Image: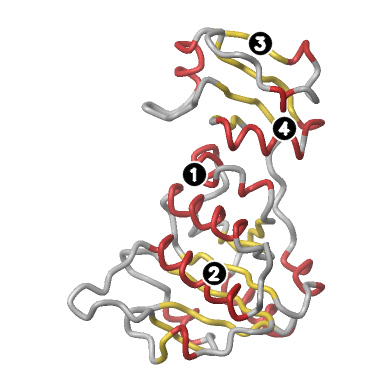
Amino acid sequence: MLIYGIHSCRHAITRRANDVLRVYVSNKRPIPAWMSGVPKDAVLCVSEDIIARMVPKYAAHQGIVIKIKDITSRDISALSDTPPNCAVAMLDEVTDPHNVGAIIRTAAAFGSAGVILSERSSCSVNSSVIKSASGGTEVVPTYVVSNLAQAIEKLKTYGFWIVSFSEAGSVFLYELDLTGKVCMVFGSEGSGIRKRQLDNSDFVSKLPTNPDFTTLNVSTTAAIAFYEVARQNGFQA
C-alpha cells in the first residue's frame, strides 16, 4: 500500500515503523525528524515528478510517499469487549473515499471505537481514504464485514444500540440518550441506508436542519453525530 501526504505518513511511520518498506521524499524538502525510526537505507530522496507519478492525479502528496504493509482490518467480535460508553460507525454503501476518510478522521478525533465497512458495498481503506483521514486510519480500527445486517445483530448481542440516520427520521439526534454503546449507521448520499439496516435499527434519527435545505454531506452528518455522542458521554480529549 502507498500512503502519501505529511499527516498520513507521519502517523503511519510513528505508529507502524516496522511495517514501512520504503520512503520516498522530495529532494527539495528536508527529511522530517519524525522519520528517525525508519532505517536510512529505506529512505530515497527523489524528484517531485517521480513522487507525482506514484499517486493519483492532482493528489496533494506534499513531497512524501511511503510504501507500507496494508492496514489489517479487525474481526467484529473484538467489539464485544468495548468499554461501557463508546461509539462505532457503520457505513452502508458509502463509496466515496473522501467521505470514508473524513468519517474515519472524525471518529479518531472523538475517540470512536471503530468504523465498520462492508466488503462489497463500501469503499475499502485505500490510499485516498488514508490521505483524507489524515492519520485517522492509524488510530481508529476498521472492521470489514460481509453482511451489515448480520453485523448489526451481533452488535446488539454486544450491548450496542443501533441508530440510523435519515432525513425521514422520527426523532432528532439530541432527543436520544446516547450514553452507553452506540452504533451509528450512515448511508450513501444517493440512496441512503438500505431498508434492511433501517428495519434492524433501534432508532432512525435526523438532524435539526433548515426545512428548506435539509441535505448534508454524509461525512458532515457523521461529524455532528460523533460530537453529540462524545458530548453526552463526557468525552475528554
Q: Secondary structure at mark 1?
A: helix
Going 47% across and 66% down the picture, which residue do you hit? 222
Q: x and y percent of residue 227 in the render?
A: 53, 70
Count how many numbered circles sit on residues in the image: 4
Q: Nearer the viewer, mark 2 or mark 3?
A: 2
N-term-proximal mark, 4 vs 2: 4
| Cα separation between marks 2 and 3 | 39 Å
Q: Which sits in the foreground, 235 or 96? A: 235
| Cα separation between marks 1 and 3 | 24 Å
Q: What is the number of the mark on residue 13?
A: 4
Q: Secondary structure at mark 2?
A: helix
Near mark 1 (Cα within 10 A), the count class, few <14, some 14-19 or many ≥20, is many
N-term-proximal mark, 3 vs 4: 4
Q: Which sits in the foreground, 31 or 17? A: 31
Q: What is the number of the mark on residue 58?
A: none
Residue bearing mark 1: 132
Near mark 4 (Cα within 10 A), the count class, few <14, some 14-19 or many ≥20, is many
Going 70% across and 52% down the picture, which residue do you hit? 73
Disc 4 marks a residue whose amino acid type is Ile
